[in-house]
Image (tube, helix red, strand yellow):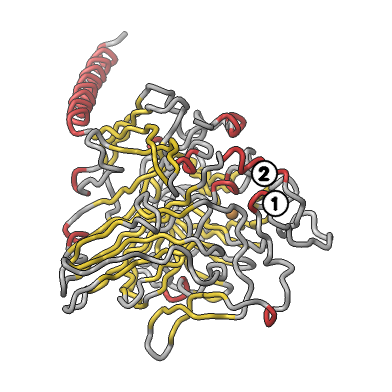
Amino acid sequence: MNKSNKSLTKVVAVIAANVFAAVLANARADDAQRVKLFVRETPITVNGRTINMCSIVQADGTPGYSPEQSGGFHVEVVNQLKAPTVLHWHGLTVPNSMDGVPFVTQAPIQPGASAMYDFPLKESGTYWMHSHYGLQEQYLVSAPLVIWNDQERAKADQQFIVTLTDFTFTPPAEILKQLRNAPAMDMGGMNMGGAAKPADGMGGMNMNGASAEPAATLPPVFTQHWDETNSRLVRAMVNAAPANIDVKYDALLANKRTIDNPEVMTVKPGETVLLRIIAASVASDFFINTGVLDAELLAVDGQLVQPVRGNYFQLAIAQRLDLRVTIPQSGGVFPIIAQGEGTTLQCGVVLATSGANFVSLSTNADMLTTPLDNTQESLLHASAPLSAKKIDRSLPAVLTGTMQGYQWFINGNKYPNRNTLDVKLGERVEIVFTNQTPMGHPIHLHDGAFQVVEINGKPISGAQRDTIEVPPNSTIKIAFDADNIGLWPLHCHIGYHADSGMMTLLKYDGADTQFWQPEQVPLEKLDL
Ligand SMILES: [Cu+2]
């Protein structure tokens, strides 16, 4: 070895030692400030019956995690379940290895084991976390994730988190089995040509959209309507088919409570109240009714929009709404109700001033609803839209399915497979979602927000969000800058659809694929 090589070796060794010391120092700092999140079984009583479900809680029982943005994200996930798990930080921009998707970006966390998650926080606002392992979300392995800063605190005088879930006593694997064994009915794009008839109550299925009776003969249902005169979103009756839903639930829950025993939140006359509403449901979209209180919609999926007023809002699975209301000076009791799309089930919370007399809420809605549609989405405009830039790459994502065996597809492919949507670092990318089925699909792309830029052919500087509802027979275009190298899932957030094929991956050129083992997803073995 000559002299110059020797000194180079020495320099490299010194740098390596320094880097190692820095890594150790960081690790120690992270250990000290990491919050432990325990994933565990937890009993819950619904409709008078107690059953074991799950929760994600801190040591003191607080559900989820609400860090200060400036301090970053520092969590140790402790798996206390009898099955493997992995948690995903829904909507956050993270290094790919921190995304929390088993067999895509990491190995599952085995029972009794832990995994560490440390990264800076780019976003603030209303997010959530959930298991990305099979159907565990149906066991309520989900929790709020609200990221605070001064701007978030300034949104209202008082703030509450409202987490909405759908609850069933039927094990999810049993629901999936029923769905897969149900009579065939075409859901668009695949196996076309049969004169499909609506299935009749089999396995909790209710398929009445594709070949519905003429609209005039159907009973009225509710939908969301833009009242042009008063510039508000309101509820309106229409002669139209109610929404298709394919899973029937025993209850809807708001903060894990049924409608007959709602959480009552004490508020003061004259103050502003922000409701951070999270649709942590598996197969239930919602219509949110704020009743006599007009609300301002301030943010969707944690991202600010130009405010929209109204008392009736749409919220698809996995999305979030920040709704601000003002409590009247006269005080009183103000129910905030979430009705499931296409069902009379509802849940909610109650805002009440002290001394106001709260009696009870009606347990079921008086009518069904239409599917979620583009009414609200078409009114939303991002406060911080994407910069103007030419599109480097346009990718199609055609959504199809068949009730024959309950199979769902993106671009004709059923996950697991090794087909990907490929991008390169630095590109402005658009994805065009075309829904050829008579059901809406709430599509989630991992890695932060995208912008909605076109709805049914009409350009819009729409919301920045991480989950977009693609209503039946709609086409929606989103755009984003490919600036975070990785392997990012793109999937329907109806759990039973994602686990029956409606998923693919956005793959960056050069992404680390060491954990990607699509053949490794043992869906039917996931029951707790
Ligand atoms: Cu779907």
In primary-sequence order, the first of circles 1 and 2 is 2
Q: Position of residue 297 (x, y in %)?
A: 33, 70
Q: Residues within 10 Å of mark 2 (few under 14, many from 20)?
A: some
Residue that badge 1 annotates: 202
Q: Position of residue 481 (x, y in %)?
A: 43, 56
Labels 1 and 2 touching (C-beta < 8 A): yes
* Residue at image point 21% right, 65% down: 155
Within the image, what quadrant is residue 295 found in? bottom left
* Residue at image point 34% right, 52% down: 255
Q: Residues within 10 Å of mark 1 (few under 14, many from 20)?
A: some
Indicate the quadrant containing the N terminus: top left, top right, bottom left or bottom right: top left
Q: Secondary structure at mark 2?
A: helix
Apparent side of residue 350 relative to residue 421 in the rendered image (left or right)? left
Q: Amino acid at mark 1?
A: Met
Q: Amino acid at mark 2?
A: Gln
Ligand 1 is located in which of the four quadrants? bottom right
Q: CA distance from mark 1 to mark 2?
A: 8 Å
Q: Position of residue 13 (x, y in %)?
A: 24, 17
Whether ligand 1 has any atom under 8 Å from the Cβ at mark 2 is answered as: no
Residue that badge 2 annotates: 178
* Residue at image point 53% right, 40% down: 135
The disc placed on residue 421 is none
